Image (cartoon, rainbow, N blue to C red):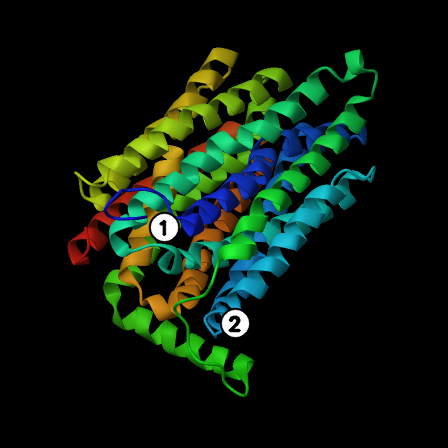
Amino acid sequence: MDKSKGKLTKLERSWILYDVGNSAFILLISTIIPIYFKNIASSDGVLPSDSTAYWGYAMSTSTLIVAILGPVLGALADTKGYKKPLFTFFLMSGVLGCAALSLPVPWIIFLALFVFARVGISGSLIFYDAMLPDVTSDERMDLLSSHGYAWGYIGSCIPFTISLILILFADKIGIATALATGIAFILNALWWFLVSLPLLKNYKQLHYVEVDNAPMAMAFKRLGRTFGDIKKHKEIFIFLLAFFFYIDGVDTIIGMATSYGKDVGISDNNLLLALLLTQVVAFPFAIIFGKLSKRYKTSELISVCIIGYFLITLFALQLDKAWEFWFLAVCVAVFQGAIQALSRSYYAKIIPKESSSEYFGFYDIFGKGASFTGTTLMGITTQITGNSKFGVLSICFMFIIGYVIFRKAVKMQTVS
């Protein structure tokens, strides 16, 4: 941002636009895709509790793949000239995977395509997050990161609303619901690609290490050094450990909310409309928390978000009515963008800028590893007990552990 006028630069607007693009697919992951999957799985005789578990396993598989690849790719991306090409590769993988979900395939193939698409978007986000130090200054990171999530929430409502109209009024339009859903997948893939073009055009890597004759070997060497540095700088390691636990709960709630809602009897229409409301409400609150970061310590705002999510999870345990799901959606919206944006900018300020991709590779390990743990834990617990509410209960403990460790990390940090 321009410090004197407070306006977004062309590059910063381009960076925010990618959040608008990928958020469209992220919204599909928490709304239309799991509903569509559960419907096609049900038509093949799969029990609701089993399809919820399989969905959780698919989420876990995709996050595990990226968690394994992330640090190595991050180390390679810090080499001069590598960050944008790697970002582009994963971006296109995600876009093509999203479009491929429109194919009329059995539920198991659909899950495989979903894993491919989610690996694409998750991989692109490693490099997208690592671009932050190249895009803006330390003083503006909290605000810009919050703007990214905020505009991502509200911008993604455009293709989602069109998709929702297509699906809900498919009969009146004269097409099958399955075909309408397929068109929605293609529409969102196209949206994601088009709004990503400005970032592909305007981004230039400012912080990097020079090219070596053997960049991959050098990447592994730097990866080992970075891991050693993280162990030495305990303030970074403790923060990552706390992040692992509290973001576990956040990602699991985002990824499993729709499946859980269907299991407790919430109609498809109520699920979709409530989650659309989440995006709308999340927009102003992400901006508000970004502005609050000027007045209050980032660490204190993150703590408030963790406590808020813990209370939300407790409320979800007794959820069985549509209005309760709507209320839950609004509560999630208040904290969702803030905890993600502030965690990202907080971390970006405490790591070396020339190694941002490496460090964000580890950030992704802890984040995606958490998502793997949470969705797997919820999937297994739900399948064993036959009740999704026991799966939700297991997530509560992640917020408790995350909060305790985060407060310890705060005492060790030199940034606010």
Along the line of sight, the residue nearer the viewer: 402 or 196: 196
Label 2 sits on a secondary structure element that is loop
Q: Position of residue 84 (x, y in %)?
A: 54, 63
Three-letter residue code for mark 1? Arg
From where the camera sits, is residue 310 visible? no
Label 2 or label 1, whichever lies nearer to me, is 2
Disc number for residue 212: none
Q: Do we see residue 2 in this rendering?
A: yes
Q: Residue at x 48, y 19 (%)?
A: 325
- Above or below: residue 162 compared with residue 375: above
Q: Is residue 330 above or below residue 187?
A: above
- Picture coordinates of residue 365, whole percent (x, y): 46, 59
In the image, what residue occupies the spot 83% across and 37% down?
Answer: 104
Amino acid, disc 2: Gly
Query: Which of the 4 image quadrants contains residue 265?
Result: top right
In the rendered view, tell whether residue 219 sits above or below residue 147. below
Q: Which of the labelled discs sits on residue 81, or is there none?
A: 2
Residue that lies at the very extreme toward the bottom in this rendered image: 213
How far apart are labels 2 and 1 at the CA level? 23 Å
169 or 16, nearer to the observer: 16
Find residue 307 and report its image quarter.
top left
Q: Which residue is mark 1?
A: 344
Of the pair 221 and 307, the residue shown nearer to us: 221
How crowded is the residue under tag 1: few (<14 C-alpha within 10 Å), some, or many (20+)? many
